[in-house]
Amino acid sequence: MKQILILISSILISTSLMAAGGDGGGSGNENSKASLYDDAVKLVKRAGKLEKKDKTEKAKKLYSQAFKKLEKAYKSDKKNPDVLNYMGFTSRKIGNFEKAEEFYLKGLSIKPDHNGINEYLGELYVQTNRIEKANERLEVLKGCNCEEYSELELIIKTRGTKVY
């Protein structure tokens, strides 16, 4: 009888913990951070498709929405260069070049060899007519054997036409 009571008590305690969200794995913030980031990336991809269809105003709205989600993700994870990369990207896409540069540089201070940040910062430098700085970013990417190098190289070479 004592064993049955212990078993029932254990089941009740386990059920109460599960109902309260306690799974022993933390507060669940990891999922919400990842979810905010993932949601933002989806918005960025949708915005990119709109841009290709010359629907720039709609695209800018999505970039702004993505930025808000990234801002929330950043508040709980300030050491994530991917979040900073997309914060820079979305800022750049809505025309806020100064903020974009700040986010890219903050990301590079965490991970100097981040391919995406180096490419996008190089693109920003092309957009703002700082070709020497764009070439510096290209030099950082030189040994990566990655598409970011090829894309930035093409943008630098064809800077007279808009490909970024």
Image: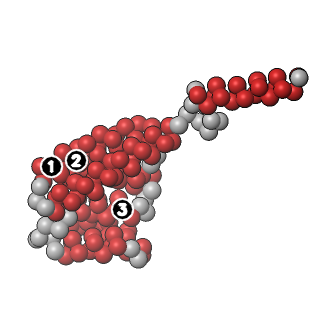
**Amino acid identity at mark 2:** Leu
- SS type, badge 2: helix
Residue annotated with mark 1: 58
Q: Left or right? Give the position of 143 relative to 53.
A: right
Closer to the camera, 126 or 17? Answer: 17
Residue annotated with mark 2: 62
| Tag 1–tag 2 contact (CB < 8 Å) | yes
Quarter of the rendering occupied by the C terminus: bottom left
- SS type, badge 1: helix
Q: Left or right? Give the position of 5 relative to 25.
A: right
The number of callouts visible is 3
Closer to the eye: label 3 or 2: 2
Residue annotated with mark 3: 116
Quarter of the rendering occupied by the N terminus: top right
The vertical placement of 24 against 81, above or below, is above
Disc 3/disc 2 C-alpha distance (Å): 20 Å
| Tag 3–tag 2 contact (CB < 8 Å) | no
Dot 1 or dot 3: first in sequence order is: 1
Position of residue 58 measured from the top left corner of the image (x, y, whole percent): 15, 49
Dot 3 or dot 2: first in sequence order is: 2
Residue 114 visible here: yes
Residue for point 65% across, 36% down: 24
**Amino acid identity at mark 3:** Gly
Position of residue 6 measured from the top left corner of the image (x, y, whole percent): 82, 25
Residue for point 50% across, 37% down: 29
Q: Left or right? Give the position of 6 relative to 42.
A: right
Disc 1/disc 3 C-alpha distance (Å): 24 Å
Residue that extends furthest to the front in the rendered view of this protein:
1
Within 10 Å of the Cα at label 2, are there few (<14), some (14-19), or many (20+) other Cα atoms?
A: many
